Amino acid sequence: MNNVIITLRTNEELKKQLDMLALQENRSLNNFINTILLKYVEEEKSKKEKK
């Protein structure tokens, strides 16, 4: 699978909060956001499979 670049626009406060969370998990901000998105997609997939 090829990686693609996306742009995310958000407010400064949310970015600061995400930076702090990424730092706590010893991840880059990009890696942290990607991990959050992957978890969300997997949860939604699981919900649909249970129906």
Image: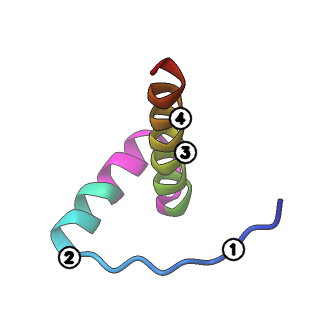
Picture residue at 48% right of the left edge, 30% below the top: 48
Q: Which one is in front in this view, the residue at disc 1 or the one at disc 4?
A: 4
Residue type at mark 3: give it. Answer: Leu
Q: Distance between the residues labelled 2 and 1?
A: 23 Å
- Using the image, determine if residue 20 lies above or below residue 50: below
Going from N to C along the chain, the mark reached first, 2 or 4, is: 2
Q: How far apart are marks 3 and 1 (CA)?
A: 14 Å
The number of numbered badges drawn on the structure is: 4
Residue type at mark 4: give it. Answer: Lys
The residue nearer to you, when weighing 39 against 30, is: 39
Residue that numbered label 1 is attached to: 4
Residue 12: image location, x then y, percent = 20, 75
Magenta stretch, overall SS? helix
Q: Which one is in front in this view, the residue at disc 3 or the one at disc 2?
A: 3
Residue type at mark 2: give it. Answer: Asn
Q: How far apart are marks 3 and 2 (CA)?
A: 22 Å
Picture residue at 55% right of the left edge, 45% below the top: 38
User: Magenta residues, as a range?
Assistant: 19-29
The residue nearer to you, when weighing 16 against 5, is: 5
Residue that numbered label 3 is attached to: 38
Residue type at mark 1: give it. Answer: Val
- Using the image, determine if residue 3 lies above or below residue 25: below
Going from N to C along the chain, the mark reached first, 3 or 1, is: 1
Q: Is mark 1 on a helix, strand or loop?
A: loop
Q: How far apart are marks 1 and 4 (CA)?
A: 22 Å
Going from N to C along the chain, the mark reached first, 2 or 1, is: 1
Q: What element carries label 3?
A: helix
Q: What element carries label 4?
A: helix
